Structures are given as structure tokens and as C-alpha cells.
Amino acid sequence: MNIINDLILQFHLKLLDMMKRKDIFLISLFVSLVAPSLNAEATKLEDGFYFGSTLKDSVDVSSSNENLVIIFSDGSKYSFDRKDKTAFYKKNISNDGETLIQVIDSENFKILHNQNTENIKPYSKYTLYKKPGFLNKVIAALVTSALLFSLFQFYLKLNKVWKRRKISEVANSISIVASLLGFATLVPFLLNSILITADYPSSVKYILGLILAIAFSLISMGYFVDENKGVGFFTLLGRALKTEGQESGDLISDMLRPKGATKIIDILVKLAAIDDDIAKEEIDLINQFASKWDIKIPELKPGKPDQVTNLVELKSLVQSYLDEGPDIEVAEGLVDLINMMAEADDEVTKEEEMAVAEFTGMIAHYVGSEKGGKMNMYEVNIVPQDDKQINAVKEILPELDVVIDRGGKVFKVGRYFSEDYAEAVCEKYITLGLYSVTSKVVVDLSKD
């Protein structure tokens, strides 16, 4: 209102000056051009949800006299400043133009992209279809108060640990890696809220988070511990990272410990020798778990193993472990452990790849039997060509019975979880002169 009063006062002074000079033409021209703009008010857009007819999308709009905020359907939020009485604008972060919100009336507006550049995109028109209800107003009030709660939360979190920052046990209980990752997650959001969306309340929350990340990083390094006084910053950081690296396997170790630890070690030993070569990295991993679980094992040496691992025997050992009924979470953790073993020496051989695929399938079948669902398996069939081959199969596999399948006599050897493993089984019988094939079948785990 002060600006308008000043303009009116200037207008009267100018008018008196013109009257003194009796310049009637200039008076009438000035009044016709300036007076309407002084009396006109800036068009205000209604708050609510708008539908875009061009892009077929929906946006959430909240506006004031000097600012307009739009939340798009993908969750992105942008703030626009008043440009003139019917428009809002936002400069592109690359400073090569601006996005313009042209207000048609209180319930309609256009978005015009890349203004002030040669590459102007077609505009998108939006129309109000729903005003915010009572619940929306309540949520808006809660969002406003959330910043205050964030301040209290920040204080309570920091206050609790700050008084104990000089205790080494407290420092060791905080993950330095998790603290440092706070910077990687918070900084991009902070820059986005300041430079792009202009969402300053959110930026305050991110700044508080960064302060916490700094404080927890320093505490986890032992920076405030008395015995570390005089030790350099980077030395403390290196120590903390090294300690965390040594403890990184504790969670999975504790998860697998409850049941079948001895068989797990046996599985790892045999898996390490599956490629007829045991790597030092594999031995270190096995010894780590054996020591953690207090299980004594024969001394392992890098190189060719004393005993060649039989893939069928190893599969039977895995099945024996699953027959003991370990917890679902423990069985799923065994998948990660098997993959860690296969990749420990940075080289996954064909034998290891086949074993990992088959054992992963076995565990998935075990988990699926508890949770239900379906999965693909590969069935190996021996198709005898004459009575002589039928008798030969009965001698080799006396436990199998011949069945009629697809109009012929077939011996169903078994189902496997890995196609490569099934093909390897097939190849074994083919070398004996028996016609053998694999077929893909879908198994309903709830009925299996």
C-alpha cells in the first residue's frame, strides 16, 4: 500500500505541474496509460489441484501475492517469483532462460518454458479441478510445524551423545561410514532445495542433518577422546575406517550363527575347492567365520586341494543343511555368503558359477516352500532308444522307474535349479551312450 500511495502522490505532483503548463494533451495521455495500472490488482491464482490438458498430468499449486509454488506429479517442487501482475517466473539454473507462469485468471494458467531464448517450447495449460479440502489444510499446518519438531529432534539427538563424546566406547559404537554417507545423501537434497525448488524450510532440515553428520563423524573418529589428543585428523579417520572394515562382516556372521554353523564351514571349504584351486582370500574368509564361531578346522593352504570336491556331494551337503530347517533369514543369508566365497579371489570359474546358481536355486526353493509362489526348474530325462538301453539305465540307476511321458518310455532323473547344472548332468549320461534331454518346468512351491 505504501508503494501505491507514493505513486499516487507522484501522479498528483505531476498532474499539478502539467496543469501549470496547461498541457492538456499530455495530462489525458498520462491518465489513460498510468491510472488503470495503479488501480489494477495482481491476479491471484487459487490454491488447489490443476489438470494439464497438454501433458495429461496433475499439479498441486499454492500461491501468495509474491510467490507461487507448484508440486508436479513426479514429486518435484518448484517456487516461482512474481514477475508482473499476471505472471511468475523462475530463471533456469543454467542461466540460459526462464520458465514463466502466465496467469490467465484465478483458475487457469499456462507454463511457458525457456523464455528469453531462441529454443522456446510449446506452453502447457492447466485448469483448477479441485480446491484443497479440510484434510489438506490440516496436513499443511502439520508440515509447517514439522520444522519446529525437527529442531527439537536435532537437539535431543545431539545432546544425548554430545555429553558422552569423550568416552571411547561411545565413539566405537558409531559407524564412521554411515556418518560420512550422510554427506552424500544430504548435500544433493540441500542444493536442490536452495537452487532449484527454493524450498527453504526443507533446506533448514538438511542443514541440521549435515550438522549431525559432522558431529557424529567427529565423535566416531574419537576426535574428542582424551587419549587421542595430538593425533592428526586424517590418522583418526584412517583408524576408524580400518576398524569398520574389520567389523563389516559381523552382522552376517551373527545372522548365520544360530544353526548349522559346522555344516556352513564344511560347505565353504568344499566350495573353495570346487575349481581345484583354493585361493588365499577364500582361506581368509573361511578362517574368519571358523574363528568367529569357535569351530576348529584343518589347516588350509593355497593351491591345489588335498581332496577334489565332488559337485554332487557338495549339493547333498547343502540339502542336508536345509533339511535341518534353518530360519528363513539365515537361509537367505547363506546365499550372500556363497556369493562372497565365489568372488573372494576376484575370479568366478565356470564350476563356481554353476555351483552358486544351483545352490542359490536350492535355497530359493526352501524359502519359497515357506512363503509360497512359483519358480522355474530344469528336469533331466533319459529317453532309452531300445530295451537294451532300458536295462542299462536300470543297472546304473536302480532306484528309478520307467514312466510313459509324451508317448514314450522315459526315466526321470531329477529336477535341478540351474540350467547349466542340469545340462552337466545330461552330458554325463550322454557320454555313456544314453539319449538324455532337459526340459523347463514351472513348480508351484505351495504344493511342492
Image (spheres, rainbow, N blue to C red):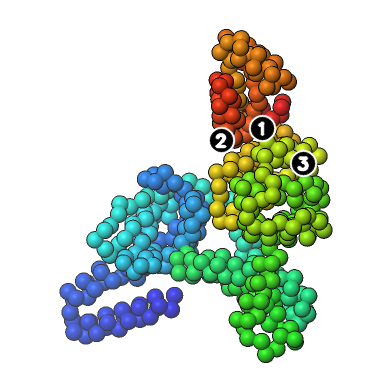
Label 2: element kind: helix
Bin the neighbour count of mark 2 within 10 Å (Cα to Cα): few under 14, some 14-19, many 20 and up. some
Return the disc, 1 or 3, that comes first in the chain's sequence.
Answer: 3
Quadrant of the snapshot with the C terminus: top right
Q: Residue at x 80, y 49 (%)?
A: 262
Q: Check disc 3 and give the amino acid type.
A: Tyr
Q: Is residue 91 above or below residue 343?
A: below
Q: Looking at the rendered structure, which numbered label has been put on residue 193?
A: none
Q: Looking at the rendered structure, which numbered label has been put on residue 420?
A: 2
Q: Is residue 227 above or below residue 332?
A: below
Along the viewing direction, whichever of 159 and 145 lies nearer the viewer: 159
Label 1: element kind: loop
Label 3: element kind: helix
Q: Residue at x 26, y 58 (%)?
A: 119
| Residue at image mark 3 | 321
Q: Is residue 277 above or below residue 12?
A: above
Return the disc, 1 or 2, that comes first in the chain's sequence.
Answer: 1
CB contact under 8 Å: marks 1 and 3: no
Return the disc, 2 or 3, that comes first in the chain's sequence.
Answer: 3
| Residue at image mark 1 | 373
Q: Check disc 2 and give the amino acid type.
A: Asp
Which of labels 1 and 3 is toward the front?
A: 3
Q: Check disc 1 and give the amino acid type.
A: Gly
